[in-house]
């Protein structure tokens, strides 16, 4: 019963839904399918930031804390201008979101811990949001056509392989791998926001940053209880 009282804040798919609410695209998509799909859903894309209030342990369900408060939705902000470097960064964000999704999905299948399943669902929406930006700015999607655990960038591939191996040995190793992913994302997003002026990209990055901070808190609580 120990797991049923763990605090895993903000990891439900609706806790921080970022991306197309009416049509969330798959993580694995054909080269011609990912960007058009994002274009079709851009007008319906919603960025939802859920507000979470503290609850008693007895209110937890399945070891995952249910979110309270209202979900305030805002349409995707207007398009701006990205430099060549910022476009490269945007493509890298897609790889990072896919890495998180693929890793957490694998761990969810290995361990009976809902935290991985719920955060993986959130990462699917995050990738959809980034793909929408890739389409808006005519940037090639490096995740298109890639199977789970496959990446275009050698660095992303090496990171995934290393963290997967770390998490295969034990639940604690998997949770720590998740913590590493979120810490890396926080650093990358904080850096990417510096000097960024495009309203829509700032909006998505800011919400991705908030999500990573909440996911990090969830992993920290689970690690503390192990």
Image (tube, grey):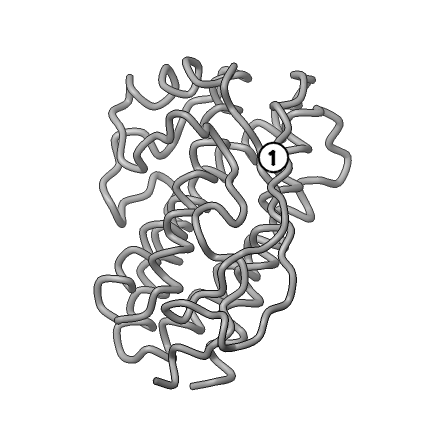
Of residue 10 and residue 210, the one placed in the foreground of this image is 10
Tell me what residue is drawn at x 44 percent, y 73 percent. 176
Give the image location of residue 184, x and y in percent: 55, 58
Could you tell whether 72 is left or right of 142 in the image? right
Asked if residue 222 is positioned above or below residue 104 in the image, the reply reads below
Residue highlighted by disc 1: 204
The image quadrant of residue 23 is top left
- Disc tally is 1
Out of 190 and 50, give the one closest to the viewer: 50
Give the residue drawn at x 41%, y 25%. Answer: 22
Q: Does residue 40 lie above or below 196 as drawn?
A: above
Residue 185 image position (x, y, % from top left):
55, 53
- Tell me the quadrant of the picture where the C terminus can be found: bottom left
**Kind of element beneath mark 1:** helix
Q: Quadrant of the N terminus?
A: bottom left
Residue at x-position 44% and y-position 45% = 97
Task: From the top left corner, tell me how far across and down residue 134 is, in percent.
Answer: 49, 23
Decide if residue 150 is on the left or right side of residue 65.
left
Q: Quadrant of residue 86?
A: top right
Q: Is residue 176 above or below residue 99?
A: below
Q: Residue at x 53, y 60 (%)?
A: 215
Q: Residues within 10 Å of mark 1 (few under 14, many from 20)?
A: many
Q: Position of residue 152 (x, y in %)?
A: 34, 39
């Amino acid at each position: 019963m120990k797991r049923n009282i763990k605090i895993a804040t903000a990891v439900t798919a609706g806790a921080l839904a970022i991306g197309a609410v009416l049509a969330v695209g798959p993580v694995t998509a054909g080269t011609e399918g990912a960007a058009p799909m994002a274009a079709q859903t851009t007008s319906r894309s919603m960025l939802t930031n859920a507000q979470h209030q503290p609850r008693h342990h007895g209110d937890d369900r399945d070891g995952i804390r249910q979110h309270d408060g209202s979900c305030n939705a805002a349409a995707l902000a207007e398009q701006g201008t990205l430099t060549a470097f910022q476009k490269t960064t945007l493509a890298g964000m897609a790889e990072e979101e896919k890495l998180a999704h693929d890793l957490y999905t694998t761990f969810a299948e290995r361990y009976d811990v809902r935290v991985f399943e719920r955060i993986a669902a959130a990462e699917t929406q995050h990738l959809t949001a980034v793909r929408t930006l890739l389409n808006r700015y005519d940037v090639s999607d490096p995740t298109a056509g890639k199977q789970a655990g496959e990446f275009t960038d050698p660095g992303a591939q090496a990171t995934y392989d290393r963290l997967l191996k770390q998490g295969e040995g034990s639940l604690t190793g998997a949770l720590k791998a998740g913590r590493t992913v979120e810490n890396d994302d926080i650093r990358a997003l904080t850096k990417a926001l510096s000097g960024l002026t495009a309203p829509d990209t700032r909006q998505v990055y800011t919400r991705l940053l908030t999500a990573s901070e909440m996911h990090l808190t969830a992993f920290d609580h689970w690690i503390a209880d192990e």
